[in-house]
Image (tube, helix red, strand yellow):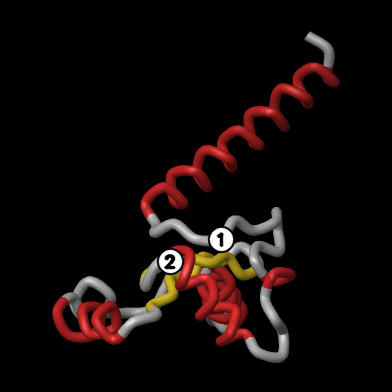
Amino acid sequence: MKLSTKLIAGVAGLLGYILLKRYRLRSRLPHGPRGYPIVGNVPQMDQQRPHETLFEWSKTYGAIYTVNFLGSYIIVLNSEEAIREMLVEKSSDFAGRPYAFRIKVRLLWKQESHSPQK
């Protein structure tokens, strides 16, 4: 096999893996407005009044839906019942912070750079 053929196969395989992973994540989340690649729903938002855009989307998608901001999926709760269910009834399911790769890399870097030298 030529190197270019292997490279094309590798890129196609990586792209397929990324798309499959995104599809699996997206299929577990509540439905919401479809965004653009990379930027998500940012261009669709009113930058001066984002709360109004979120309220309009709740009329279409219901009290609980998902939006994508620059690759981060955010679940929006737009009713008192949905908020109460999340904060009171299912609080243990939603406790904690989301995993942030950037924070983990930064902490790892600080830990390695401050380790004593032998």
Evaluate whether residue 63 shows in this view: yes
Q: Quadrant of the C terminus?
A: bottom right
Evaluate whether residue 118 shows in this view: no
Q: Residue furthest top?
A: 1
Horizontally, is 97 left or right of 100 in the view?
left
Q: In which quarter of the image is the N terminus?
A: top right
Name the N-terminal-most of marks 1 and 2: 1
User: Looking at the picture, does residue 43 appear above or below residue 6?
Assistant: below
x 71%, y 90%: residue: 48
> Does dot 1 land on a helix, a strand or a loop?
loop
C-alpha separation, residue under disc 1 versus residue under disc 2:
8 Å
The residue beneath circle 1 is: 33
The residue beneath circle 2 is: 65
Q: Which amino acid does label 2 sit on?
A: Tyr
User: Looking at the picture, does residue 114 appear above or below residue 60?
Assistant: below
Q: Residue furthest left?
A: 89
Residue 27: x, y in percent? 41, 47
Looking at the rendered structure, which numbered label has been put on residue 91?
A: none
> Does dot 2 land on a helix, a strand or a loop?
strand
Q: Does the CB distance between marks 1 and 2 fall below 8 Å?
A: yes
